[in-house]
Image (cartoon, rainbow, N blue to C red):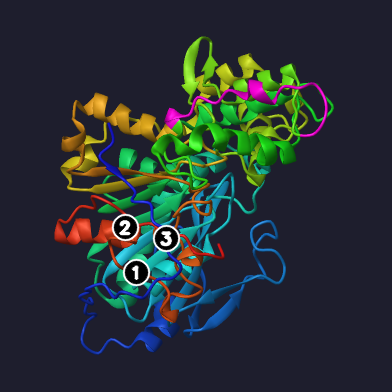
Amino acid sequence: MLSSYLLHLSLLSLTLVSPTLVLAQPPPGFNFDSACSTTVSKLSIENVTVFATQSVPAGTNITFPDSDPSCQPAGSSQFVPEDTCRITMFVSTSNRSGIHMETWLPRAWTGRFLSTGNGGLAGCIQYADMAYGSALGFATVGANNGHNGTSGAPFLNNPDIVADFAFRSIHTNVVVGKEVTQTFFGTPHTKSYYLGCSTGGRQGLKSVQDFPEDFDGVVAGAAAADWNHLMAWSGNFFLITGPQNAPTFIPINDWIGFIHQDILNQCDTIDGVQDGIIEDPDLCNYDPSDLICGSGSNCITATQAETISEVFSPFFINGELAFPRYQPGAESITSVLLIGGSMFTFTADWFRFVVFNDPSFDVNTLNASSWALAQDLDPFNISTFKADISDFKNRNGKLITYHGQADPLIAPVNSERYYNLVSDAMQLSSSELDEFYRFFRISGMGHCAGGVGAWEIGQTLDGSADDVSSGSATLDPDRNVLMAVVRWVEEGVAPDTLLGTKFDNL
């Protein structure tokens, strides 16, 4: 069914492995510092307003005083590992919408272009990803998804902002970013790449599905695909658990304490190794009945046992499978967002400000008919579940997806489901899909990063190293998913495995 699996290995440290790079050559006489100071006067792109350029020396910590506090809390900063020219701008997407975007152009440019993604409902540029991409020699772009902050409130009465969130921000960011890159360096990029996770993973798949010419290689992690069903699935947990005073509710400390341990007792050794990691949660059919004892510590009621069974069951709308089950073993402190006794924040905002377009709507009244309504509405095809990606395949694009098997926010089986959907729609076997699409299941990884398993695969700056130039990162394509897709695109060497890393303090 699946072409590739992550090799699980716990390591304490990594040594920098420099990839074989052939640097792009800007025109004779190109001066990086001069270009950074003069590019504003050279840029003339329709609907684009350039705010400023900033030369950022290697080792600088930059702050973002104009960012929404929900994106960049007061006092936060981003370490920039390599000499970079930072260009900030605004791009109008309609008469009532637009994106704030940035282009980070590295002095040691490799000729490559990289777009980063976003997370949740957020209108937040992922500055850690911007720093990571530019440090690796990519001309790197990021945008705010058409609105500022982590709330869905800007969607209210403005379908154009919803359109930006659904598809337009990433595509516009790429089109403008490529033109800025060419103007700055005086020569076009050689290859174009994408790196994102969660909503960023959905954005990557959206590009593959609807804008196949945007990228030569895409890395999409834990994709929030089948968006409408995901929002409904996430909200439905409140219908299962009830509020914190309901007899069906289970405190989060119980979930991550004795319930989690009981799950491990039943399922950890299915793979023959007792290591605190459920290698393949699909094989875990957890039965909570042994914990029923009525009262006392480490004890649940029969009603709470039913709650656990429902949490670990697939989600249906009108009798049709809508979303796969929450995986046993994924329960963690982050799970409180779904099973903490209140409506999931993203679901609440999506239904208030998009589905019902009513800020006073009581989200505690959401029910099965609400889920069906969202399914039918699917604004701007935000579902992002188009299975025929022949156009991307035919232009020789390469797609790598990955999903942590202990993801507490998006059921990892959803990524398996999309992989199989593509296989069925395009009538391609797993070995045939291997030519352009590889999917990695990462045991013990949480949501995009973290977890008890060997979760670090080069998908983040924070996980790869405190800074890329410190010597503790790896750019080895066998260990770095971004460099793996680069090698696949540029050398034709596809990744059969990815070697994961678990740091002893992360």
Q: Residue at x 52, y 47 (%)?
A: 446
For the question of whether residue 102 can be seen, the reply is no
Label 1–label 3 contact, CB within 8 A: no
Judging by the rendered image, the residue that carries numbered circle 2 is 193
Q: Considering only order in the chain, which callout, 3 or 1, is on the residue closer to the N terminus?
A: 1
Label 2 to label 1: alpha-carbon separation: 9 Å
The answer to which of 415 and 246 lies nearer the viewer is 246
SS at badge 2:
strand
Which of discs 3 and 2 lies nearer the camera? The answer is 3
Q: Check residue 501 in the rendering and tell me which mark sits there, or answer none.
A: 3
Q: How crowded is mark 1: few (under 14 residues within 10 Å), some or many (20 or more)?
A: many
Q: Is residue 190 left or right of residue 307?
A: left
The answer to which of 316 and 302 lies nearer the viewer is 302
Q: Considering only order in the chain, which callout, 2 or 3, is on the residue closer to the N terminus?
A: 2
Judging by the rendered image, the residue that carries numbered circle 1 is 138
For the question of whether residue 197 can be seen, the reply is yes
The answer to which of 54 and 422 lies nearer the viewer is 422
Q: How crowded is mark 2: few (under 14 residues within 10 Å), some or many (20 or more)?
A: many
Q: Is residue 103 placed above or below 170 in the rendered structure? A: below
Residue numbers of the magenta segment: 282-297
Q: Is residue 294 magenta?
A: yes
Q: Is residue 213 placed above or below 478 in the rendered structure? A: above
Type of amino acid at the residue the image marks with label 2: Tyr
Q: Does the magenta stretch include residue 53?
A: no
Q: Is residue 495 left or right of residue 328?
A: left
Label 3 to label 2: alpha-carbon separation: 23 Å
Q: Considering only order in the chain, which callout, 1 or 2, is on the residue closer to the N terminus?
A: 1
Label 3–label 2 contact, CB within 8 A: no
Label 2–label 1 contact, CB within 8 A: yes
Q: Is residue 243 placed above or below 25 in the rendered structure? A: above
Type of amino acid at the residue the image marks with label 1: Phe
